[in-house]
């Protein structure tokens, strides 16, 4: 049970960074909303329910059921599909190749997400106080450097 709770935490943690980009786009995009209480609550409500539906339907009811002897993730799913088409060599080659490509995309996402998340959070300073715009990148670099130094 603790592994299931840990896996759900990872899923929510990764998906949980997306609202940062959504909020910024909603209030500074091509057709920005005004910074009114109703608009902020409306956007937060849409984000909350979208996350709840996606995580509940996609991850908990579908992805968490696919496991390879207790293991999960893209490589476990690749192993499952590889065993499922053992006699079809060409199809197996393509499906395993797609699984490896998916794993590469996942690892790339894991490398870039922290930097983009911190930068997205710090960009909120530019929305609140436009005079702070020149300091966004240096502050983000300082946060990432301090985080790395403390790890």
Image (cartoon, rainbow, N blue to C red):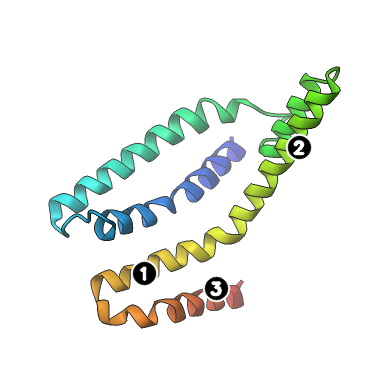
Is residue 93 placed above or below 35 in the rendered structure? above
Whole-percent x and y of residue 69?
Answer: 74, 28
Q: For the C terminus, which image quadrant?
A: bottom right
Q: Position of residue 3 (x, y in %)?
A: 61, 39
Front residue of this view, candidates 137 and 70 = 137
Q: CA distance from mark 1 to mark 3?
A: 18 Å
* Residue where numbered disc 2 is placed: 97
Packing grade of label 3 (10 A; few <14, some 14-19, many >=20) is: few
Q: Are marks 3 and 2 in contact (CB under 8 Å)?
A: no
Of labels 2 and 1, earlier in sequence is 2
Q: Quadrant of residue 25?
A: bottom left
- Decide which of 7, 109 is in the foreground and name it: 109
Using residue 70 as the reference point, say whether residue 113 is left or right of it.
left
Could you tell me how far apart the alpha carbons at marks 3 and 2 are, in whole angstroms?
35 Å
Q: CA distance from mark 2 to mark 1?
A: 38 Å
Counting the numbered discs, the total is 3
Identity of the residue drawn at 28% across and 41% down? 46
Q: Which residue is at a point 39% across and 77% down the rendered structure image?
A: 136
Mark 2 and mark 1 in contact? Answer it, CB < 8 Å: no
> Where's residue 63, x and y in %?
57, 30
Residue drawn 71% across the image and 36% down it: 98
Q: Residue furthest top?
A: 87
Name the residue beneath numbered marker 1: 123
Give the secondary structure at mark 3.
helix
Residue 2, above or below 142: above
Residue bearing mark 3: 147
């Amino acid at each position: 049970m603790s592994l299931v709770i840990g896996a759900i935490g990872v899923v929510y943690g990764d998906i949980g960074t997306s609202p940062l980009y959504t909020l910024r786009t909603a209030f500074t995009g091509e057709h920005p909303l005004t910074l009114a209480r109703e608009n902020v609550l409306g956007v937060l409500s849409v984000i909350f329910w979208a996350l709840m539906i996606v995580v509940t339907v996609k991850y908990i009811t579908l992805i968490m059921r696919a496991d390879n002897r207790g293991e999960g993730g893209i490589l476990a799913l690749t192993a499952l599909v590889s065993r499922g088409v053992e006699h079809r060599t060409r199809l197996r080659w393509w499906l395993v190749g797609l699984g490896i490509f998916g794993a590469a995309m996942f690892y790339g996402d894991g490398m870039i997400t922290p930097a983009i998340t911190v930068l997205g959070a710090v960009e909120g300073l530019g929305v609140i106080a436009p005079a702070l715009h020149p300091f966004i990148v240096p502050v983000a670099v300082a946060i990432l450097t301090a985080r790395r130094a403390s790890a």
